[in-house]
Amino acid sequence: MSESRSQEQGEDSEVERLRAEVRQLRARMRTHPLISEAQGLLRERYGLLDAESAFALLQRASQQYNVKIRTLATALTVLPRPDAREPLWFPRRVRRTPPRLTFDRAGRVGHGDRNALLGTVLSQTLAVVDADMGNVQTADRAQGGLRMEKHTGHSPEFVDYFAHVGEEGTSCALAARNLAQVTVQDVETHPVFAEQAREVILREGSLACHSVPLTTASGVCAGMVSAHLDRRLPGLTEAQTKVLDIIGGEAGAWLAWYDRTVVLDALEHLHALGRAHTGRQSRRS
C-alpha cells in the first residue's frame, strides 16, 4: 500500500471518528435536559441530598420494571405530582391485562416487553411491505413530535438526523397528523419532504417509503412504523394496507396499555423509593 493511500485511509478514519463523536454528543444533548429536569423534581419532592441520589432512584425503578430511564423521566415530568401523604402515587387506578396482538404469532412480546413489541412491529411491517430498511418511532410526550426507538438497515447518519422529527417535513409526520397510512411512491419528487430530509433519505438509498401510525382506541398517535425501499413503490394492495392497519391499531393499544400500567407501576416504585430515601444519599447501582 502506498504512503499516500495509507494517509488517506487514516484521514478517513479520523473524520469518521469525529462524526461519531458529534452524533454521540447530539444524542446526549437531546436527553440531558429531560433527565436533569426529572432529577430536580425528585430532589424537590423527596428532599434528596443531590442529583446523583435522584438519578440512582430513577435507575433502580427503571431496572425493576424494565422501563427506559428516558420513558420514566418523561412520565415523571408530564404527569401530576403525587400526594406526599399517600403511599401510592395512583391509589385508584384500575389494572388491565395487555391487549391481544394477533400479528405476534410467534409470541415474541412477553408481558410488558416494550422493546420486543417495537421489534415485532418493525419486522412484521417490513415483511408486509417487502422492505429491508425501516424504523419505529414513539410519540415524544415531553417535546412533541416523534422519537426513533428502533431501526434496521439505516446508517448512523440517517438515525442521527431522524432521531427526533417534528410535525412537518416528513411522511411520518404527515401520517401522525392525519392518523392515516402514507405512501411515498417517489421520495425524489414527493412534496411532503423538507429538502434536507429528502437529501438524507436519498443518500440512504431509499427511493420510496410507507408510514403506518400506531393509534390508540381514543384516536391518539402513540407511535409510527416506517418502511423504506430501494425501489419506486407503485402502491400497496388493499390486503397489505388492511394488515398494516391491524398492526398499527393493536400496537397503539398495547403502547397505551403499557403507559397506563407498566410505566405507572415503575413510577409508584419510584415514589416509594423517594419516600424511603428522604434526606438520605443514594448511589446508582
Image (cartoon, rainbow, N blue to C red):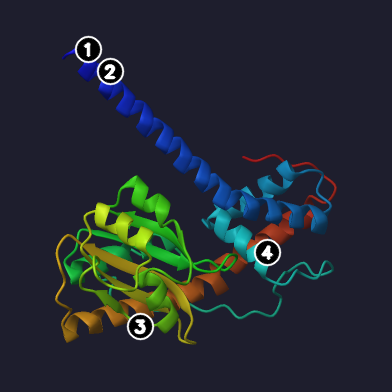
Q: State how far apart marks 1 and 3 are (Cα).
A: 56 Å
Disc nearer the start of the sequence (3/2):
2
- Residue under the image location 41 percent in, 57 percent down: 162
Relative to 135, is 158 above or below? Answer: above
Image marks 1 and 2: residues in contact by CB distance under 8 Å: yes
37 sits left or right of 264 in the view: right
**For mark 4, does the 10 Å Cα neighbourhood hold few (<14), some (14 to 19), or many (20 or more) residues?**
some
Mark 1 or 3: the one toward you: 1
Mark seen at residue 77: 4
Relative to 94, is 16 above or below? Answer: above
Query: In the rendered structure, which amino acid carries the disc numbered 3?
Result: Ala
Q: State how far apart marks 4 and 1 are (Cα).
A: 56 Å
Outermost residue, top side: 3
Q: Nearer the viewer, residue 146 or 170?
A: 170
Disc nearer the start of the sequence (4/3):
4
Quarter of the rendering containing residue 253: bottom left
Disc nearer the start of the sequence (4/1):
1
